[in-house]
Amino acid sequence: MRATTMIPMNARALRWTLGLLLCLGNGMAALGISARIKDIAMISGVRDNQLVGYGLVAGINGDGDKNPIYTLQAIANLLQRQGINVPAATLSSKNVAAVMVTADFPAFKKPGSRIDITVSSLGDAKTLQGGVLLQTPLLGVDGEIYAVAQGPLSIGGFAAGTDGGGGASVQKNHPTVGQIVGGALVEREIPMEVLRDNALELMLREPDFTSAARLALVINGVFTNSATALDSTTVRVRLPENMEGSTVDFIARLEALEVSADNPARIIINERTGTIVATSRIRIAACAVSHGNLTITVASTLDVSQPAPLAQQGETVVTPRTETSADEEKAGLIPLPEMPTIEKVANALNSLGVTPRDMMSIFQAMKQAGALQAELILR
């Protein structure tokens, strides 16, 4: 009997199949990637709102809630609104499930338009398959009703099987969560204020002082002296006098302008998935890297000792024996010159024959040595 345990001391021995994603810059790397204003910024005051409501899903074929008090009380309240007074304790909820309904309310949605909703089980129902959401009011954070939801659910999966010992079951996706496309009817509009004192504010999705300054510069190149960068996030834009009364046209022209947003030197390392993402601005100062592998092998062997033939006394004895060996590949100290671009960094590391997991360790060591000129983020 022989058992062997391999203990890798270097990431190469793990043989991970990992991905290295490099966000390489182009000819405008010094200025960043050119993008429309509408893609990198949003208008202050124009935002989504969250809605939530409590409701019932009916029509579940015997897989509903197991009679929790809140489901029974909700059914009793529903029947009472229909003119039927029935004590909650006398009801059964095996075909009904209590659910929470959530939705994102986009800006400028008018009464009569529809929005998508998500329905999730609140109790112990096995599935919502085949169920119909009964009329459910959706409330905002202020407690006011802004939409009403209703309709048949689409869960994109199923759950089937038998109960009891030895029963078999099969499940696909999450049968206790469903969606209704266009399942909520908007009843009230959420007011949005775009202009304040004849000006609007643009908010960068990724705050950066350089990007804010460039954004104001680009806008002033088209609408003279109209934009001012207030901080790393906000750029205030005044409505030109010749466009008063044409707010929509002004915003459309503003969003179509292109600006080169600045992106910092940053390396994101996710060791769980083996992913490395690096921006085009990382730099590595001159340094030397030694790369090699060390694998320790521990082998356990059981030796059997038996008494000699025709021996008067004795017994069979099993004794363990352990062998340990180490194998280390030869590796030299490889000098790396100063590398000004991510392409050269990638080529230099690839020339060492390292795996992405090895690169993670090398990047961390370079950062500790002060050679890596970039922010290192570990996930």
Image (cartoon, helix red, strand yellow):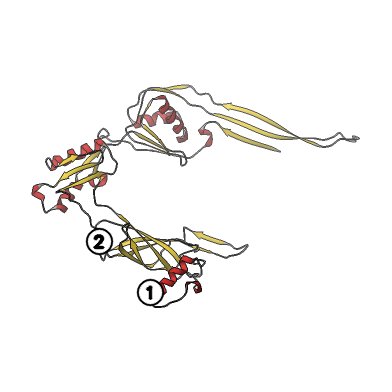
Does 363 appear above or below 181? above
The amino acid sitting under disc 1 is Arg
Measuring 39% from the left and 78% from the top, which residue is drawn there?
Answer: 83
Query: Where is residue 51, by image quadrant?
Result: bottom left
Q: Which mark is residue 269?
A: none
Where disc 2 sits, the SS reads: loop
Q: Position of residue 372 (x, y in %)?
A: 38, 28
The amino acid sitting under disc 2 is Glu
Where disc 1 sits, the SS reads: helix
From the image, state whether disc 1 or disc 2 is nearer to you: 1
Tell me if 190 is positioned left or right of 363 in this view: left
Quadrant location of the N terminus? Answer: top right
Query: Where is residue 217, by image quadrant?
Result: top left
Measuring 54% from the left and 26% from the top, which residue is drawn there?
Answer: 329
Residue assigned mark 1: 81
| Closer to the camera in the image, 123 or 246 | 123
Does 213 appear above or below 165? above
| Closer to the camera in the image, 62 or 258 | 62
Tell me, yes or no, if residue 131 can be seen here: no
